[in-house]
Image: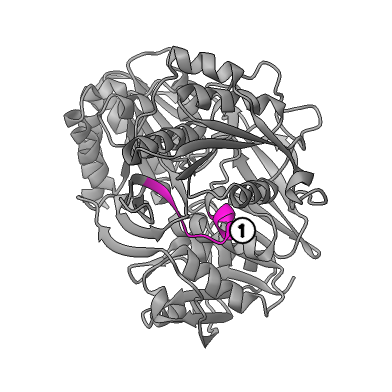
Amino acid sequence: MANIFIVADHKDGQLKRVTLELLSEFQKQGADPVAVVLGGPEGQAIADTLAKSASKVVFLENAGLTQYTNEAYANALHAYLSKQSPHIVATGATSTGKDFLPRLAAKFAVGIAVDCTEFKLGGDKVTVQRPVYAGKCSKTVEFAGTPAVFSVRPNVLPANNAAKSGTVEKIAADIGQVRSKISSVMAAASKKVELTEADIIISGGRSLKSADNFKILFDCASVIGAAVGASRAAVDAGFAPHDMQVGQTGKTVSPKLYIACGISGAIQHLAGMRTSKVIVAINKDPEAPIFQKADYSIVGDLFEIIPKLTEEFKKLKASS
Amino acid sequence: MNIFVLLKQVPDTETKIRIAGDKKGIETNDVKWIINPYDEFAVEEGLKTKEKLKEGTVTVVTAGPDRAVEALRTAVAMGADNAIHVKMDAPNADTYLAAKALAEVLKKENASIVFTGKQAIDDDQAALVSFVAELWNVPSATVIVKVDVSADKKSVQVQREVEGGTKFVIDCPLPAVLGLDKGVNTPRYASLPGIMKAKKKEIKTYQLADLGLGSESPKTIDSNFQLPAERAAGKKLSGDAGAQAAELVKLLREEAKVI
């Protein structure tokens, strides 16, 4: 299938890995997608980086794209893509991808599938697989219109990118009318590893007993570069902010390793983390439902286990 | 000010999902239905906005089957003034069709500001906010943790949270569609007089044809709903805390190869 376009996701001068994951998967299935970068002058470096993994990169440049807005992205993409007869437009299911892609689908008067975990090209069609009910089940989606517009969940598809030396075509972007304005950006107090992009997550439940006690999880996480998550019970009890919540009314994650500490495993929490590749459960209660989902189970007091685990991780890091 | 809230009725978060016989959806017998939790924040924000501005009406709208009327009545019991039901019986009415219908209602009713949840916890698309805004040709912002409507009611300033906890402060002229996240407010409970009022409330109903959408159909087709594969039984570690920690790290390194 030709005319496949991947919209690059980049932030602070860094290309997000999900863009490479998408390219890799399309190429593995025999397609040769065009990578589209939107940005001001700073986008050139992103486009050049992408040309090492895609045979063609289109750089839609406009100073009004340096600061992301959903209107500018959707307008610029539609102005360009509507002349390209696109069959597929795909991007990462990130904060920005989830924000602008529905606008683009609306402009093309087609449907959309968000946060897909698989896609299959076949003839002139594409079918996608996506989790619903926070991963309690999944479904297959087909598209009745053209282009097929979908986003993929970061961290799920492998990025085994073959080296390419692609071309970069720079085009002046038409961003149209942009009504919303970013008046300021408030950086997070501490630089945290983002849950949905993390390879390893250590999560705490109500058994942590206080916000201060989450420090033992952060200490452990910092040794192995993990993100720290929390159950809804811990968030509702005020031990952790909502942006740390994993589960049906929080974030859905699929890291390589998920370590659940003092989390009983309510159905709505399991929904948010069950696609993790390896699950470790640490809990005092041997009957906790989380143990049924765990690859490795430790029945014990997390306040004793976690500091020991931190020590072991430190030893490992020191020896490797 | 015509304050609008878009809401969806979804299965309760505790629902154990079973797949329907034709695999085109889930079994809905015995499901307890609730207002999508993120849409509850939208109802609350609508009511708070009306209270703060000391004027206006709050209208709640849903696009869905007949049972969805119950979700509208719950919102009226919380304090909403009016309710609109767009009848959509197709079992897999998709984001496209729902957004089309809702955008037409907002145009027809001349909405001044629209609140809804950042996503519905059934299909998890998180696409409706931007989709409706584009079809209606207005600005939008989503994953909002703070809302501030200007005194002159011509604009709104919101805080949108992105990966890593960074917040963007965004100014939008009104009308606009705003998708709310948890933490933006604490939804109130329905009052007893509210519940009595809600029982008798007349609900305005539209068919798709009334909105000029009689010939529209979904643009995405669902099939093959399936439950995730059960995980193989795991290993239980033994020994004291130190031994368990050491064993775990060894297994993660040598067997699972994830660290």
Placement of B203 over or under A64, stated as above or below: above
Q: Residue B118, can we see it?
A: yes
Q: Up-down: is B60 above or below A199?
A: above
Where residue A275 appears, as percent x and y from the top left, is 52, 39
Percent position (x, y) of residue B173?
A: 41, 60
| Residue in view at x 74 percent, y 53 percent | B219
Image check: A289 left or right of A124? left
Q: In which image quadrant can residue A263 be found?
A: top left
In magenta, the rendered stretch is: B130-144
Q: How many numbered tags mark residues here? A: 1
Of residue A42 and residue B61, the one placed in the foreground of this image is B61
- Categorize mark 1 by other alpha carbons within 10 Å: few (<14), some (14-19), many (20+): many
Residue B243 vertical placement versus B3 (above, below): above
The N terminus of chain B - image quarter: top left
Residue most extreme to the left: A212
The chain letter under disc 1 is B
Residue most toward the front?
A: B55
Q: Nearer the viewer, residue A131 or B187?
A: B187
**Secondary structure type for disc 1:** helix
As for residue A181 lying within the magenta part, the answer is no
Query: Which colour assignment does the render follow?
Result: one colour
In the image, A12: left or right of A95? left
Visible residue check, residue A162: no
Q: Amino acid at mark 1?
A: Leu
Query: Circle 1 sits on which residue?
Result: B135
Q: Residue B37: horizontal and vertical position, in percent?
A: 48, 31
